[in-house]
Image: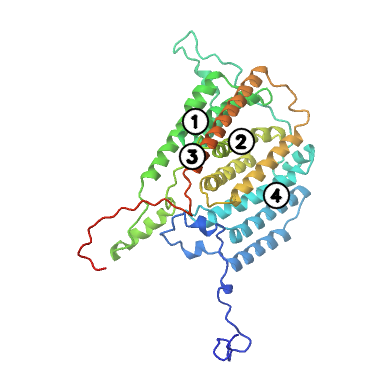
Amino acid sequence: MIDYKNSNLKNKGNKRNVGLQTIVPTKEYLIPSVAVTHNLEIEEYPKILALPHNVTSLILISAIIYYYGMSSQGSFEECSRNGVIGMILCVIVFGCTYLPDSVLRRPLPILWRLVSSCAIAYLLFITFLFFQNKDNAREFLAVFDNKLGKPLPEKSYAENCDLTTNKFPFINVENITGSVDMFVTAHLVGWYVKMLVVRDVKLCWFLSITFEILEITFRHWLPNFWECWWDHVILDIFGMNALGIWLGDLTCKFFEMKNYTWINKIQPEEKGKRMIKKFLNYFTPNYYVRHEWDIFSSTKRFYSVLWFCVFSLLVDLSHFFGKFVLWLPANHFLLAIRIYLWGLLAIVCAREYYEYITNKTCKRIGINVWLAHLILLVEWSIVLKFSDGIFSAPFPKYVLYFWSSVFLLISAITIHLVIKDFLSKGKKDETKIDLSEPKVEVEYINNCSNSEE
């Protein structure tokens, strides 16, 4: 029975106190049991950059779309290009305003919402491309560059693999310099970023060597995968790849050793320095999480990390297969946009995936992991659909023999881990505590003779 005479509803007409129902839901998508495992921010973000400006963003995007839409005139190709750009802009602005935050916050939460928004826009773009036939897809890409839609020559790096000569300096410098192009820098920067993503030297070395093996595996289909042995070993594995991994490891160790706790007590005369330092601190992690993959700890962990490796390699391979079937030059800006997007997406995606496989309280994958998987699926679907009659050459026997041995090795590891999991589960059952009759060891210490009962 409700006492209306003493209740808060008295003399308030139709108004009532709804309490917590009036609270605006947060953008954070992590459940509380997961959120408590993360260190909270100790620096307050500027409100102008941290809070979503819903009305401002709505007015701004409306004005931009209206102005450029009304002024969009010309050929069908020009209007189509402007229409696609306008569609992508709408998705990005909406995502930056309303998408949930990720586990990564620095330098600003809106940066990672921007990455997720661009990933959604890219997903829509390649999905539209997937629903075209091969010729129409190539013609559609020509809307962004009239030089596209034409067959491209593929460069082979294995035409002359002589490393030595009979003349001083007895090294064929021309062959080495001829193999140095934009991919050398791409290897260095790419593996530096990948080390920051993976945060494990051994795993990065495994991925580096495996990708070179994949180049040998598919070089009968892709001409630019043909390389000299010293190109694979010296320039790539022990050259730019190793240098990028080493520099990335130094960066990881710097973040791991750095103390990210700053004193909040500020002297008035140091306020200016504090503001500068506070701004720079946004570009460093609030805390550094060292990735301990522990690949052989259990069968589930083994396949979780194995899929992470396979996924990373498929992302790299998709770049080369995609540009081959769509006739895109290696230095084209569309491929550069894809690389930059995947680089940023990989940072937050790897962090969410690591959280999912290591944190027992995390029961679902993050939004960026979900997006990354769907994007990769559509990319390879495009390659599969448009590769009719292109990749018809059979695999060499040495490739089949090698990957058959890899399959046998994975099978042996799986059997070993299954037995290990079974034995460890048996040990846990033996040490299980019976709650009805718990075994409690009590130690009596007679040191309270003067205490009151």
Q: Is residue 155 visible?
A: no
- Tell which of 198 and 169 is nearer to you: 198
Nearest to the eye among marks 1 and 2: give it: 1
Graded by Cα atoms within 10 Å as few (under 14), some (14 to 19) or many (20 or more), the crowding at tag 2 reads: few
Q: Specify the amino acid type for callout 1.
A: Trp
The residue at 29%/55% (across/down) is 444
4 or 3: tag closer to the N-terminus: 4
Tell me the number on the disc at residue 171: none
Graded by Cα atoms within 10 Å as few (under 14), some (14 to 19) or many (20 or more), the crowding at tag 3 reads: few
Nearest to the eye among marks 4 and 3: give it: 3
Mark 1 to mark 4: distance in Å?
34 Å
Q: Is residue 282 visible?
A: yes
Mark 3 to mark 2: distance in Å?
57 Å
Instruction: For the residues labelled 2 and 4, say whether their Cβ atoms are less than 8 Å apart.
Output: no
3 or 2: tag closer to the N-terminus: 2
Q: Position of residue 372 (x, y in %)?
A: 62, 45
Under circle 1, the secondary element is: helix
Q: Specify the amino acid type for callout 2.
A: Asn
Q: How many marks?
A: 4
Find disc 4 in the rendering and name its residue: 124
Rendered-image quadrant of the C terminus: bottom left
Tell me the number on the disc at residue 427: 3
Instruction: For the residues labelled 1 and 4, say whether their Cβ atoms are less than 8 Å apart.
Output: no
The residue at 49%/22% (across/down) is 234
2 or 4: tag closer to the N-terminus: 4
Graded by Cα atoms within 10 Å as few (under 14), some (14 to 19) or many (20 or more), the crowding at tag 1 reads: some
Find disc 1 in the rendering and name its residue: 205
Mark 2 to mark 4: distance in Å?
23 Å
Mark 4 to mark 3: distance in Å?
50 Å
Under circle 2, the secondary element is: loop
